[in-house]
Amino acid sequence: MRDHIIGEDYELWNIVTDGPLATTKKNAEGMDVPKTRADCTAEDLKKWEKNAKAKKWLVCGLGPDESNKIESCTTAKEIWDTLQVAHEGTPQVKRSRGTLLDSQYANFSMKEGESIQEMYTRFTTLTNDLISLGRIILEEDKVEKILTRVLPVTWESKIIAIQESKNIATLKLDELIGNLTPVN
């Protein structure tokens, strides 16, 4: 979703995450209050249009069940925040999920009878889930983890060959998996 919105207009993503562009004026007491349509300048109307466009991009991507969840939201930010909680949970749920995923990552290993591609798919799903929670996992760390802690002992000769022939610090994970995948 983020990439679609940014692809349309980079400023729209800021509206989604930070809130609508303000169109305010000072009232008699000197306080900022929202402008009415009659008070708006051409620049203000462009802000309203951007706010509406941000909402449109979010709403048009939703199915009927999701639309019901955001029906009462008035801004793109409210819509986004509502959808985030609905899909990712509250901050406490995210924290618990992060702890669980961290544990799964620390204990990750290749299962008996599992192919390299199956292991790689599970590993990538796990690391993507961690990254979506804000964890930083460097490519070098992923490569090292697979070479030193994920593969079973039966892979030792292949691991040593890769370590001796490749620069592990610059080896990409895709390249490692390609080297580990048996040729049929």
Image (cartoon, rainbow, N blue to C red):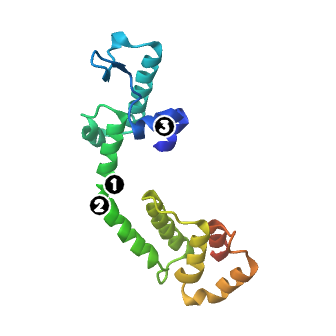
Assess whether mark 1 and mark 2 are in contact (beta carbons under 8 angstroms): yes
Tell me the residue that label 2 is attached to.
93
Residue 111, percent across and down? Answer: 47, 81
Q: Quadrant of the C terminus?
A: bottom right
First reached walking from the N terminus: tag 3 or tag 1: 3
Q: Nearer the viewer, residue 18 or 181?
A: 18
Q: Label 3 sits on what residue type?
A: Ile
Q: Is label 3 or label 2 in front? A: 2
The CA distance from mark 2 to mark 1 is: 8 Å
Residue 131 visible? The answer is: yes
Q: What mark, if any, has residue 5 been given in the picture?
A: 3
Residue type highlighted by circle 2: Val
Asked whether disc 3 touches disc 2, contact meaning CB atoms under 8 Å apart, the reply is no
Quick one: SS at disc 2?
helix
Q: Secondary structure at mark 1?
A: helix
Using the image, tell me which numbered label, if any, was put on residue 66.
none
C-alpha distance separating marks 3 and 2: 27 Å
Q: Mark 1 sits on what residue?
A: 88
Mark 2, mark 1: which one is toward the viewer?
2
